[in-house]
Amino acid sequence: MMSPARPSVRRIAALLTGTVVLAPALAGCGDSTGSRSAEGEVTSITALDYYTDATEHAQWGELLDACGRTAGVKVEQTSVPGASLIPKVLQQTSSRTLPDLLMLDNPDLQQIAQTGALAPLDEFGIDADGFAEGIREAGSYQGKVYGLAPNVSTVALVYNKDMLAEAGVAVPRTWDELKAAAAALTRPGRYGMAVDANATFEGTWQFLPFLWSNGGDERQLDSPQAAEALQLWVDLVNSGSMSKSVLNWTQADVHDQFVAGKTAMMINGPWRIPALNQQTGLRWDVAPVPVPRLGQTPVTPLGGEVWTVPKGASKARQEKAAQVLACLNSPSNMLTAAEDHFTVPSRTAVAAQYAARTPSMTAFATSVESARARTAELGVKWPGAATAIYTAVQSALTGQRTPEEALRHAQRLATGN
């Protein structure tokens, strides 16, 4: 993989002051006007992402600037709201005005690659050696790698150390231990366990570790393994160990319940760690998501954004964009981004290095090794399955259907039969 030397992002960060101003919308961003010198040399490229948070926009802007200097170009970064990115990209694909460098949420890569708008990265000598298998799959379409993620995320079990110690409860490793621990930790004003089970893809995301770790599969949602996973959540709610409000909670809501002392354990991601660290007196830790039986490895979903090189009229611009992409995915930049965002470096060796010096990330880094891309099995059909899954979760937790009935309905929804 191309790994040119680059300046320290942290040194660049120290030079930045003031408010970040987001670039204007990319009208005709594929146009090369003003991006070449008189001799025809590429001097600037465009990049599109959804990092609209001012801090996050600035951090990625610094990294893009540094990698742009390495490649000998200025990177003109535009950030749009997450919900607007794919509609904008599809419009730009149609009008052939895609940026030179494009960030996509990894489940969206298949949809865009299917249009033929992206260039395979091996055309530029970029490979995915050293990346975890699930991460390679997340950036692939029909056997070709079209995108690479510098960093990824997944979910794990976050628990209140003091509450577990007070109740004499060990950190649960299996589903049976989870049910017993959640029951022992539940008392007036506090639940033992919390998840996000709302009617969105976020709710599906949280259920996947239980579905997949039990051998369930989105290709066959009405399997006994899927029903067992859903029954676990139903049992937690029906026993009173988990609030019925999980039907409406987001992952942010689950976090708020945890820091308020209203739940002793939760499923959540590493992006919550900065806020957890700010809670004075809150003693917490992280463990892998409990598995059905002792000795199993949890299979969790892979989150994170991949960077891609859209096809364009100028091969020279694509090559410059590819150089920047390779730089973003270099080991040192992965490590810097991980430290900035509490994410897991995508190269297995770098992830191990990061986890060794950041203990709160160890469970996440370990889980990423076996994490699965959501589109690995169904590709562009994944959104239909995701909708069917959260619909099944909702109907089972409200008691409208048994887990078996809910998942049979889900299978019909997902397949259209």
Image (cartoon, helix red, strand yellow):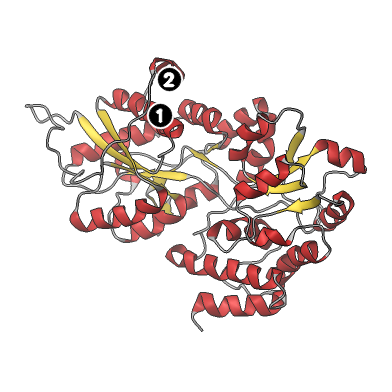
> Is 359 left or right of 164, judged from the image as shown?
left
Q: Are marks 2 and 1 in contact (CB under 8 Å)?
A: yes
Q: Would residue 2 be visible to someone looking at this image?
A: no
Kind of residue at disc 2: Ala
Task: State the image coordinates of residue 162 (x, y, percent, origin top left).
Answer: 84, 36
Q: Would residue 285 be visible to someone looking at this image?
A: yes
Q: Is residue 249 above or below residue 68?
A: below
Kind of residue at disc 1: Ala
Residue plotted at (67% across, 74% down)? 223
Q: Quadrant of the N terminus?
A: top left
Of residue 348 and residue 110, the one placed in the foreground of this image is: 110
Q: Is residue 267 above or below residue 231?
A: above
Disc 2 crowd, CA 10 A, few/some/many (<14, 14-19, 20+)? some
- Figure label count: 2
Q: Residue furthest left?
A: 38
Task: State the image coordinates of residue 297 (x, y, percent, origin top left).
Answer: 71, 51
Q: Which residue is mark 1?
A: 58
Task: State the image coordinates of residue 143 (x, y, percent, origin top left).
Answer: 41, 56
Residue plotted at (77% across, 52% down)? 193
Task: Indicate the quadrant where residue 395 lies.
Answer: bottom right
Q: Residue furthest bottom?
A: 417
What kind of element bears circle 2?
Answer: helix
Residue plotted at (43% across, 29% down)? 59
Task: State the image coordinates of residue 327 (x, y, percent, origin top left).
Answer: 38, 30
Q: Which residue is mark 2?
A: 13
> Is 79 left or right of 38, judged from the image as shown?
right
Task: Indicate the quadrant where residue 322 lies.
Answer: top left
